[in-house]
Image (cartoon, helix red, strand yellow):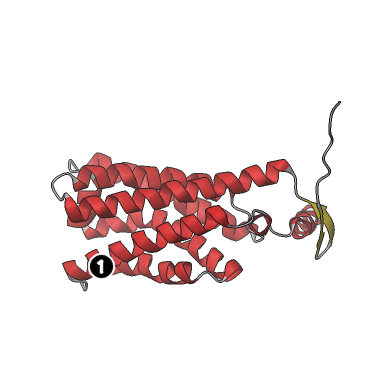
Amino acid sequence: MSVQTLDEIYEGQFGPFTIEQSDRQEVILYRAGLAVAAGSVAIAAVCCLLSPTFSPVVATLCYVLLWAGLGLSLFKIHIYLRLLHRVLQAFWAIGGVASIAIALLYPTPLALTAYQFPLTIFGIGFTFAALTGIFFKEAFCFNRLETKFLAFLVPGLLLGHMSGVLSMAAERGMLVAIAALFTVFAIRKVIQPIPPDIGDKSVFEYLEKERQQAA
């Protein structure tokens, strides 16, 4: 005897919609990508503070994991504005290509290169611009306090290092704050109910119909 479960029906702005298992899986993968990225930042921060000898290599590996986790999140995130979604994905891709190019041009580990040659952040920074976009989205949609800080701390650290206005102590403090807040954010996403991350599917359907009519 088989048991059939009915999807719960939600009332959206443009009509009723149901949340399917595939929607839930996308949210789980989105959060998993964020967890990988947050964990990578935390490991890199701890290593840079406690083990400076090996930190460039570890931080570079952590950056690769961050980039991969961020990519997974950006391909599974639900954003109403398609243009914004595509821009964040483009930033992520540019950051990846730039990182590979910089890694091939310089003999030192990528993290050490970015630290010693701040102008390389112009390329690597696209990855963090995409990450900052997620922080802005989460701050706007869910009013999360930690993402409001992260949305300014991440670009602040990168731009501050590029311009040379930050002391080493300030940079370390900002790195610790970013790692801690990102970890809090990732944990809170894990325990957050899934439907809010899916959003109003009737809005997505309406926008898709508008695009098809315009085409």
Task: Say above or below: 106 vs 14.
Answer: above
Where residue 198 sits, quadrant-wise, is: bottom right
Label 1 sits on residue: 173
Taking 97 as reference, is 10 left or right? right
Which amino acid, mark 1?
A: Gly
How many tags in the picture?
1
Expressed as whole percent of the image width and height from the top left, the position of residue 161 reads: 24, 66
Q: At 46% across and 49% down in the image, what residue appears? A: 35
* Residue 214 in the image, given as x and y percentages of width and height: 78, 57
Q: In the displayed structure, does residue 119 sit left or right of residue 6?
A: left
Residue at 32 percent across and 45 percent down: it is 62
Residue 22 or 90: which is nearer the viewer?
A: 22
User: In the displayed image of the protein, which residue is found farthest to the front?
Assistant: 1
Q: Give the answer, above or below, for where 4 lies relative to 187.
A: above
Name the residue at 86% across, 26% down. 1
Between residue 124 and residue 153, name the one nearer to us: 153
Q: Is residue 139 above or below residue 125?
A: below
Q: Whole-percent x and y of residue 43?
A: 30, 49
Q: Residues within 10 Å of mark 1 (few under 14, many from 20)?
A: few
User: Which quadrant would residue 210 be assigned to in this image?
Assistant: bottom right
Task: Tell me the residue at 54%/56% (across/down).
Answer: 189
Q: Is residue 196 left or right of residue 75?
A: right
Secondary structure of residue under mark 1: helix
Kindly tell me whether residue 70 is visible in this rendering. no
Instruction: Say if residue 67 shows up in the picture.
Output: yes
